[in-house]
Image (cartoon, grey):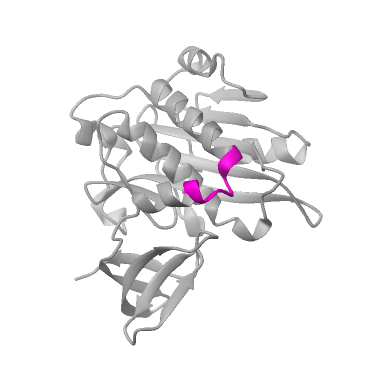
């Protein structure tokens, strides 16, 4: 994707601000500056290459030139949105990506809380960050990175979970600009419904490992549980080995397929 393709893809979308960079450290840093300057969004920054892209827990997100879709959104929050439901934001991004990939004939799933899978392999990461003005939640930053070509997939030695790319799964090249427009349309359609049950239902319908036994990891500890679904605030509902049901928020645990 280049600047002209980006501009054409953004045409007609209800966005307050857009920017494209051939290469940049992190698009999330760009929209964070917009938020700090008082811009309300919705706005989007995208790049052909990221040199300092980041994922959850501070991990590096691999974005070589022309191989991935790297974009960050600044989103205003619906008036009725409660800060306690911030966990829904990763679901919003994951759901928008899933619907864009489904339009290509693919069958993605969301690996809670913030990854999108194709055939059980990670193809996309979503990073949601809250922006506060004092004690008031002002806006959210949503960073989205999608592996489009094989060169976006890191070497196996650097992976902590199997990864793939859209081109390999679709069997054909996919235009980054068209995919970005599609997922932005989905984000903008779901954003006013962020607090609705419908969003949770759509997210849960695409939830990887639902009803299955998974491994939970927290620090050096590992144990088994059954994945039940989602709580209203976006937490993950699990049945532990002794039969107890618990909900976990993002950052408390990591999940892996059961063995």
Quadrant showing the C terminus:
bottom left
Residue depicted at x 64% and y 31%: 42
Q: Image point 41% across, 46% down: which residue?
A: 202
The correct choice, above or below, for 188 with respect to 213 in the image is: above
Q: Position of residue 181 (x, y in %)?
A: 46, 24
Can residue 83 be seen by looking at this rendering?
A: yes
Q: Is residue 187 above or below residue 203?
A: above
Farthest-out residue, right: 134
In which quadrant will I find the N terminus? top left
Q: Nearer the viewer, residue 136 or 207?
A: 207
x, y percent for residue 238: 38, 72
Q: Residue at x 43, y 70 (%)?
A: 253
Image position of 3 (left or right of 104): right
Q: Is residue 233 left or right of residue 219?
A: right
Between 240 and 9, the residue placed more toward the observer is 240
Which span of residues is magenta-colored? 192-199
Q: Quadrant of residue 49?
A: top left
Q: What residue is rendered at 50% in x and 45% in y?
A: 92
x%, y% of residue 7?
53, 15
Q: Main secondary structure of the magenta part?
A: helix
Question: Which sits in the foreground, 120 or 201?
Answer: 201
Q: Does residue 110 appear anywhere in the picture?
A: no
Q: Is residue 257 magenta?
A: no
Query: From the viewer's perspective, is residue 17 above or below residue 122?
Result: above
Residue 138 at what x, y percent from top left?
74, 46
């Amino acid at each position: 994707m280049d600047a002209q393709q980006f501009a054409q893809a953004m045409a007609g979308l209800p966005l307050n601000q857009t920017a494209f960079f051939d290469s940049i450290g992190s698009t999330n840093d760009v929209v964070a500056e917009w938020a700090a300057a008082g811009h309300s969004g919705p706005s989007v920054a995208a790049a052909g290459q990221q040199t300092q892209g980041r994922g959850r827990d501070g991990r590096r997100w691999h974005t070589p030139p022309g191989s991935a879709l790297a974009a960050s959104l600044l989103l205003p929050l619906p008036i009725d949105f409660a800060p306690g439901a911030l966990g829904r934001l990763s679901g919003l991004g994951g759901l928008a990506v899933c619907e864009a990939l489904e339009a290509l004939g693919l069958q993605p799933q969301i690996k809670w809380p913030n990854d999108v899978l194709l055939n059980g392999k990670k193809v996309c990461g979503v990073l949601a960050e809250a922006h506060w003005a004092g004690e008031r939640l002002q806006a959210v930053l949503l960073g989205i990175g999608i592996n489009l070509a094989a060169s976006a997939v890191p070497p196996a030695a650097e992976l902590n979970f199997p990864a793939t790319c859209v081109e390999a799964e679709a069997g054909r090249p996919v235009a980054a600009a068209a995919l970005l427009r599609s997922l932005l349309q989905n984000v903008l359609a779901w954003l006013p419904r962020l607090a609705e049950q419908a969003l949770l239902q759509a997210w849960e319908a695409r939830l990887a490992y639902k009803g299955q036994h998974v491994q939970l990891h927290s620090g050096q500890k590992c144990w088994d549980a059954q994945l039940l679904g989602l709580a209203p605030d976006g937490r993950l509902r699990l049945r532990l080995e002794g039969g107890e049901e618990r909900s976990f928020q993002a950052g408390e645990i990591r999940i892996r397929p059961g063995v």
